[in-house]
Image: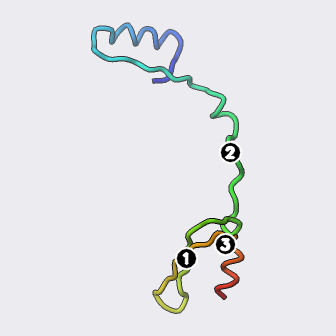
Amino acid sequence: VPYIKDFSERFRHCIGDLDVRLSYTGINNLRQLIKVGKDRLEKDSRSNIVYKINCVDCNASYVGQTGRLLRTRMREHK
């Protein structure tokens, strides 16, 4: 439950007779305000992936795995 000054205290008092334990979270926390992690890579710039290529002439498909960049592996399929 988000912690809201005064309201949370009154709410806790109202449910005091129930066998319920509340856990509060902050409404705004630093993690939500600051971008965490790295920028996303373009799909063809990823490595160590499993990929699927659909045939343009029929319903067949090919599933492969590579540790190299996907763009490098895709060039080899042509």
Which of the two labelled residues, at mark 2 and mark 1, occupies the earlier sequence position? 2
In the image: residue 66, left or right of residue 39: left
Q: Quadrant of the N terminus?
A: top left
- Residue at (39, 11) in percent of width and height: 12
Q: CA distance from mark 3 to mark 1?
A: 10 Å
> Mark 2 highlights which residue?
37
Q: What element does badge 3 sit on? A: helix
> Is label 3 in contact with label 1 (beta carbons under 8 Å)?
no
> Mark 3 highlights which residue?
70
Which quarter of the figure has residue 67?
A: bottom right
The outermost residue toward the bottom is: 57
Q: What element does badge 2 sit on? A: loop
- Residue at (51, 18) in percent of width and height: 3
Q: Quadrant of the C terminus?
A: bottom right
Which quarter of the figure has residue 26?
A: top right
> Mark 1 highlights which residue?
64
Identify which residue, 3 or 61, lies in the foreground. Answer: 61
Q: Amino acid at mark 1?
A: Gly
At label 1, counting other C-alpha atoms closer than 10 Å, the crowd grade (few under 14, some 14-19, many 20 or more) is few
Q: Amino acid at mark 2?
A: Gly
Q: CA distance from mark 2 to mark 1?
A: 28 Å
Residue 15 placed where, x, y %?
33, 12
Which of the two labelled residues, at mark 3 and mark 1, occupies the earlier sequence position? 1
